[in-house]
Image: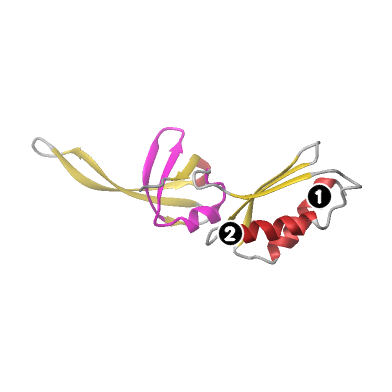
Amino acid sequence: MTFKDKVAELLNAALEEKPSVFLIDLSVNEAGKINVTLDGDHGVTLQDCIDVSRAIEHNLDREEQDFSLEVASAGATSPLKLVRQYKKNIGRTLQVKTATETIEAEITNANDDFITLEWEAREPKKVGKGKETVQKKQEIKYSEIKEATVTIKF
């Protein structure tokens, strides 16, 4: 079993204890630097990071392999990677980049195949001069999304 496999096994065991917390990214380099990025259905607390860190660190032997460990939550501006992240952000504003456009809109639905975005836009009137506000709605498949981030408004 490789060092990375052992870390992944310990990480999975720790996450089984916390069903609302899930893995975004795990990386282990040749120098033994372990980076774990977590997210949660209701956010990630400092205690969640501490518990996962201890579950990994206390079960590895530094005499066998020297390592450094960093466990962190996905930042507020980190791109969304998993379907579970899109689902937990329903009702929030996302900035979604596809190959052809960038849309900033509210995510109103997320299933296993696509997300639904809704927003208001100003468009020229069909009859007469001026513009009118229209409701827009678009479904975007996950495979078409290049990057999606939550937009934070104050």
Q: At 68% across and 58% down in the image, what residue appears?
A: 50
Check residue 101 for magenta coloring. Answer: yes
Q: At 61% across and 60% down in the image, what residue appears?
A: 21
- Judged from the image, the secondary structure of the residue bearing numbered disc 2 is loop
> 79 or 140: which is nearer to us?
79
Extreme-right residue of the structure: 63
Figure check: 21 above or below 27: below
Check residue 139 for magenta coloring. Answer: no
Tell whether 36 sits left or right of 8. left
| x and y percentages locating residue 47 in the rendered image | 63, 61
Q: Residues within 10 Å of mark 2 (few under 14, many from 20)?
A: some
User: Upstream in the sequence, badge 2 or badge 1?
Assistant: 1
Q: At 42% across and 32% down in the image, what residue appears?
A: 100
Extreme-top residue of the structure: 100
| x and y percentages locating residue 69 in the rendered image | 74, 47
- Please give the residue where the numbered disc 1 appears in the rendered image: 5
Q: What amino acid is labelled 2 in the image?
A: Thr
Q: What amino acid is labelled 1 in the image?
A: Asp
Tag nearer the camera, 2 or 1? 2
Start and end of the magenta stretch? 79-108
Tell whether 147 sits left or right of 126. right
Tell whether 3 sits left or right of 105. right
Q: At 81% across and 49% down in the image, what residue appears?
A: 5
| x and y percentages locating residue 25 in the rendered image | 65, 47
Whether the residues at callouts 2 and 1 have beta carbons within 8 Å, the answer is: no
- Please give the residue where the numbered disc 2 appears in the rendered image: 45
- Judged from the image, the secondary structure of the residue bearing numbered disc 1 is helix
Rounded to the nearest angstrom, the CA distance separating label 2 from label 1 is: 26 Å
The picture quadrant where one finds residue 96 is top left
